[in-house]
Structure formats: C-alpha cells, structure tokens
Amino acid sequence: MLDLNMQAAGLLHDMAALQPEGRSSLGYKRAAKAVVALPLPVADLMRAGTLREVPFIGPSSARIIAELVEGGSSATVEKAVAASRHSGRIAALRGLRSGFLSQWGMESALARAAPERVVSRESFRGDFQMHSSWSDGSEHLEVMARACMARGHSCMGVTDHSYGLPIAGGMSMADVVRQHREIDRVNTRQAGTFRIFKGIEANILADGSLDLDVEQRRVFEFVVASPHSLLRRAEDQTARMLGAVRQPGVAILGHPQGRMYNSRAGVAADWPRVFAEAAARGVAVEIDGNWHRQDIDAVLAAQALDAGCLFALDSDAHSIGELRFTDFAIAHARLAGVPADRVINCWSDDRLAAWMGERQAI
Ligand SMILES: [Zn+2]
C-alpha cells in the first residue's frame, strides 16, 4: 500500500538526521511526527492549500512534501544527502522505516474492501497485550479494563512484565498473587459482560529460554514471550526465536522482531522457519500495534499466514491513550488478508480459554 504520509515523514527524518542536533533537527522531527498523525493524505492537504496550517510544518518541510507529492521524490532531500558525508547512514535509517503505517495509512487499510472473512475492527473482541501500574503501565488495572469496555471490547488480557525485567518494573510472583485477586474481583463484578484473562509478558533470554520457569508460567492463563535484549545485533538469531516458540507454556510470541521506528531493526532471523514452528505448536504470532513497533508488519504477517500461524493483534498499551494502537495491528493483519478465524482476539471466551489451556499443558 502506498502511504505517502509515511514517505513524507521519512524524508523529513532524513533532513533531521542531516542537521546538527538542535533546533532545525528538532523542527524536522516535529514536522515528521505531525505528518504521521494526519487523518488525511498530504496530497489532499496540498491540493486544498492547507498543508502549512498543520502545526510544525514550516516552509522547508512543506517544500519537501510538495516535491514528493508532485514527483514521487524530493530533490531537496536528495541534494542534501549527496552534499553530506552521511549517505550510508541515511540509507541505513531508511531501512529502519520500512513497513510502517501512518495514521491515515492505518485508517485507509481498515476502510478498504476485503472479503468478509478477513479480520476487521468489528470482529475484534479484545486486546491481549497491555501493561498496568502493576509493572510499567501508568494506569490501574481496573482503569485499563474500563477503557477497553468503553472501546466496545468484551475481553482483554493483561500482560504486565515479569520479574526478569526489573527495568520495566517487572512483577514479583508475590505481586502476581495480589494482581490475580484484583482480576478475580473485576471479573466477578463484570461476569457475563467482560472478562480479563491473566497473562504475563515473559522475557526471552539470549539462549531462547524465558525468565519464568515452567511452574511459574502455569500460574498464568497465558504467557506472551517477547525479546527485549540483543535487538541491535546483525547476527542471525533464528535459534533463539525457535527456542522461545518451543518453550512450554508459551501462547503468544510478542513483538517478534523488537524493531523500533527509525532506531533499530530488531532481531534478524529466518522468519518463515520461526513462523512454521509457531504454527506447528499453536503459538500465536503477535502483530504489536504500538506505533513505534508495528511488529510484525503486513509483509511478514503474510508470510506467517502462509505458514499457517495464529495471530494476536495487540496494542502493547502502557496507558489508556495507547489502547487505540490495536487499530494499527488490525490494519497490518487486514493488509495481509488474515482471516478473523486465525486471530485469537476474535475468538469467544470459551475458545480462548480452551486454547490457553492447551498451551499451558504443553
Ligand atoms: Zn515487550
């Protein structure tokens, strides 16, 4: 899908990278951020003559965007890159921006026609990765639950960090007992209308094992295993990711690459092999919708679909404002043509509980 807003943002980030750190670099970064958040394509704003009304888009940013809209590239940016000594670094940065959707790109992906079986916002029942104040999230668990209900969801999975990630305020197993009591209280109160599933985000270690032992994993209804380290290595980490997928009790492979927009590529691996293993073991592959992650994207999701994978489409929200990131996950899945039946977030509570039970038993 051609997402011109995302391309425009990329060019503005090129310019930011070519400036010495300071006001002009920050100006381009702010302009890029503004373009990414636009609800309309930049071409429409240009035609309407309203591009300069967007906060943070100054004359130089507007000129770059105009060149892109009119000619498919920006002579200003290419000239600046050629005149600098940083063309190698710019090429590397461009590689760290591929496969991301802007707000407008996401909305048009959700709105575009697709066969009825393909996942949509309407078929989505609940979000299965989010963080509360039990770890590094900013809101209380019940506040997160209420916000999910307000979004029209009928279930959710809370996945605070495990104790192996102290930097993210990981929960001790004693905290987990208290958190589960709180979840039981909310579930009793909401019985029949909303259910919280008890999850955890475990940390994948360098050798593919997890920071939680097998007994500790059984305390939860489902375990998301995600990489949070070694995300800037060029070496292949297929063995690590295969190891994680094969760990007993794992239900979801969370943000599989660990990539970050304009910053890091994340884990390099033979993804079709990892996806084939996940499919064989019934482990769902996550599309993490956090805007800076979008991990995995539509291209890899299509490969995971071919491999026969299940999917989890999650926000990875750390505040109620971030719950909207599920839309980015759904958009990538929709672009990849993932059917709702393959998406755990669309399943009934009973089907979810049965699948989670099978994962726990392995
Ligand atoms: Zn994570």
Image (tube, rainbow, N blue to C red):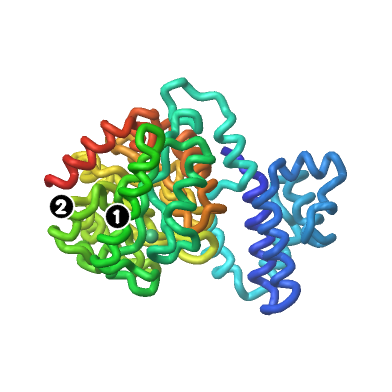
Q: Residue at x 58, y 66 (%)?
A: 90
Closest to the observer, 7 or 152: 152
Q: In the rendered view, does 39 fall on the left or right side of 309?
A: right
Q: Quadrant of residue 132?
A: bottom left
Viewer-nearest of discs 1 and 2: 1
Closest to the observer, 14 or 21: 21
Q: In the rendered view, does 59 fall on the left or right side of 264?
A: right
Q: Give how far across and how far down residue 324 sits, in percent.
A: 54, 46
Q: In the rendered view, does 151 fall on the left or right side of 57?
A: left
Q: Amino acid at mark 1?
A: Arg
Closest to the observer, 347 or 30: 347
State the residue lying farthest toward the right: 49
Q: Residue at x 19, y 40 (%)?
A: 280
Closest to the observer, 160 or 40: 160
Q: In the rendered view, does 279 fall on the left or right side of 58?
A: left
Q: Give how far across and how far down residue 116 sits, in percent.
A: 46, 20
Instruction: From this view, report whether residue 119 is shown above or below residue 239.
Output: above
* Quarter containing the N terminus: top right
**Is residue 161 something that shows in the picture?**
yes
Mark 1 vs 2: CB contact within 8 A: no
Marking on residue 248: 2
Quarter holding ligand 1: bottom left
Instruction: Mark 1 or mark 2: name the one nearer the start of the chain.
Output: 1
Which secondary structure lies at badge 2? loop
Label 1 belongs to which residue? Answer: 181
Q: CA distance from mark 1 to mark 2?
A: 25 Å
Q: Amino acid at mark 2?
A: Pro
Q: Residue at x 62, y 50 (%)?
A: 6
